[in-house]
Amino acid sequence: MIHPLIEVNREVLEALQDNKPVVALESTIISHGMPWPKNAATALAVEAMIRNNGAIPATIALFNGKCHVGLTPNQIEYFGKAADVWKVSLRDMPYVLSKKLYGGTTVAATMRIAAMAGIKIFATGGIGGVHRGAATTMDISADLTEMGQTSVAVISAGVKSILDIGLTLEYLETKGIPVVTIGQDEFPCFYSAKSGYTTPLRLDTPAEIASLLHAKWSLGLEGSVLIANPVPAELGIGTEQMEEHIQPALAAAAEQNIKGKEVTPFLLQYIAAHTAGESLKTNIDLILNNAKAAAAIAVAFADNHP
Ligand code: PSU
Ligand code: MN
């Protein structure tokens, strides 16, 4: 019995009932992660990529007082275009639901809703993490605490270097979250397949990843697995080149006294605006790449159910 505040569309519900592969998708990436109209076009292309690779997409968002699992193309467009969409992490969910507002869900909120609907695999671009300077700001994304307790695997392109990657990896270890990189020994940092950090774990195939997920959850080890999918080398942007944009972005955020939930969208928008089309193109390509990997993992996960 799914919670009455969760509305799962028919296609996703039928897929879940038949134990078919389903991939959850977030909506903050649409409302606050990329500019219109590429945000909506990307969200629709991501859904198509998941279908073409044998799974059913379930984009998650809040409206009309419900958590919706599975959106129509028109609804996805609304989240891309409208200015009145909230960025909803866990702490914002009760307010946005009870006020019947529009909410784009972050990784944390999407994971929780996916888990309540029975979805185990979730694809995104990059997760939130421990921000640079967190020792004094205490800015640690609720994505990480949620990953510590909710059993949904997250496929991302690693962790964006706007964050402190080393501290984020430490925090993931503290929370007991396996961090697996697909096909290489180095942990990727979103725009680049290289970060300078060795990945805690490496697996090369969807079947191996599915097997790790079954092993973890069948033991009762609740919580996420972070599956880092490196951006293909020909699409990546070098870490030094990105750092040249991250430094002024961080300085502008400090100058304008940007705090709390505004920090991540501010940095993402600043960097997108100052790298012209290049970072946005890479961003879109790597999300599609993650959607493809997530579909393959969802297929393997449904296939090898012990
Ligand atoms: N990182 C990205 N792109 C994004 C986000 C993070 O590279 O779109 C979004 C995701 O929705 C993530 C959220 O869950 O930002 C994290 O926000 P915060 O740092 O405020 O927890
Ligand atoms: Mn934060």
Image (spheres, rainbow, N blue to C red):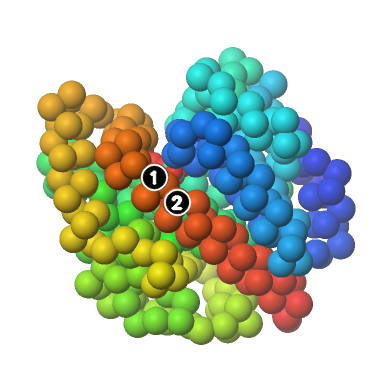
Kindly identify which residue carries mark 1. 277
Relative vertical location of residue 9 with respect to residue 238 in this rendering, above or below? above
Q: Position of residue 163 (x, y in %)?
A: 26, 51
Residue at (25, 72) in percent of width and height: 197
Element at label 1 = helix
Relative vertical location of residue 33 with respect to residue 219 in this rendering, above or below? above
Residue furthest top as drawn: 99
Residue at (84, 48) in percent of width and height: 11
Residue 172 can be seen in this image = no
Dividing the image into 4 quarters, which one contains the C terminus? bottom right
- For residue 281, the mark is 2
Element at label 2 = helix
Q: In the rendered image, which quarter is residue 239 located in?
A: bottom left
Relative vertical location of residue 50 with respect to residue 27 in this rendering, above or below? below
Q: Position of residue 208 (x, y in %)?
A: 58, 83
- For residue 61, the mark is none
| Within-10-Å neighbours for mark 1: few <14, some 14–19, many 20+ | few
Residue furthest front as drawn: 277
Relative vertical location of residue 127 with respect to residue 184 in this rendering, above or below? above
**Along the line of sight, the residue nearer the viewer: 168 or 250:** 250
Q: Position of residue 6 (x, y in %)?
A: 71, 36
Instruction: Indicate the amino acid at tag 1.
Output: Gly
Instruction: Indicate the amino acid at tag 2.
Output: Lys
Question: Is 48 displayed left or right of 124 in the figure?
Answer: right
